[in-house]
Amino acid sequence: MANKPGVKWVKRALIESPYCIGLCKKESHFNQAMKRLKVPLSNRPQWIGAGDATAHFFKNGSNKFCIVCIQKGLKRYQAYGLLVHEAVHVWQYVKKDLHEKTPSKEFEAYSIQMISQCLIAAYEGS
C-alpha cells in the first residue's frame, strides 16, 4: 500500500528471521563476506557448487547468516526460479532453527513468499 499523508505504513512481516539473509552474485564478494564473518579457510564452502545457485548458512557467535549465491548471465525467469528454490531452502533452515515442526500451510507459504520477494528485490537491485 502506498504511503499517504498522515499514515506511514511499515513492513508487514509477522516474525523476523533469526538469520541475516544476503544475496551474492560475485565470487569475490562471497570471499570478502567469508573474511568479514571470520569463517576459517578450512570451513569455507565453494561459492556455488554443481548448480547455478546455492544457499550457505553460517553462525558467528550468536549471529546467524545465510548467503544465497547465484550465477550471473541467467535469463530472468531462470534466476527467479532459482531464487524461489533457494528461498525454500532458507525457509527449511529457519524453520528447523525455530524448532517449528508443523507450521501451517499458510505460514509456510507466506514465509517462502517473503523470502523469495526479498531475494528477487536484491537480485533486481544489484
Image (cartoon, rainbow, N blue to C red):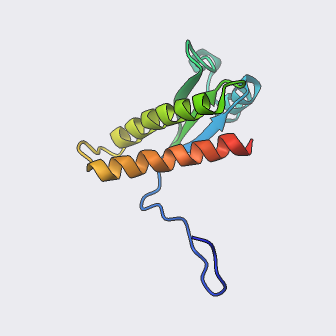
Residue 107 placed where, x, y %?
Answer: 33, 52
The N terminus: image quadrant: bottom right
Q: Nearer the viewer, residue 40 or 97?
A: 97
Q: Quadrant of residue 60?
A: top right
The residue at the point 69 percent across, 33 percent down is 33
The residue at the point 35 percent across, 46 percent down is 98
Q: Quadrant of residue 97?
A: top left
15 lies left or right of 72 = left
Question: Does residue 117 lie above or below 13 as drawn?
Answer: above
Question: Furthest-left residue in view?
Answer: 102
Question: Does residue 29 lie above or below 15 as drawn?
Answer: above
Q: Quadrant of residue 102?
A: top left
Residue 19 can be seen, yes or no: no
Q: Nearer the viewer, residue 2 or 10?
A: 2
111 lies left or right of 105 = right
The C terminus: image quadrant: top right
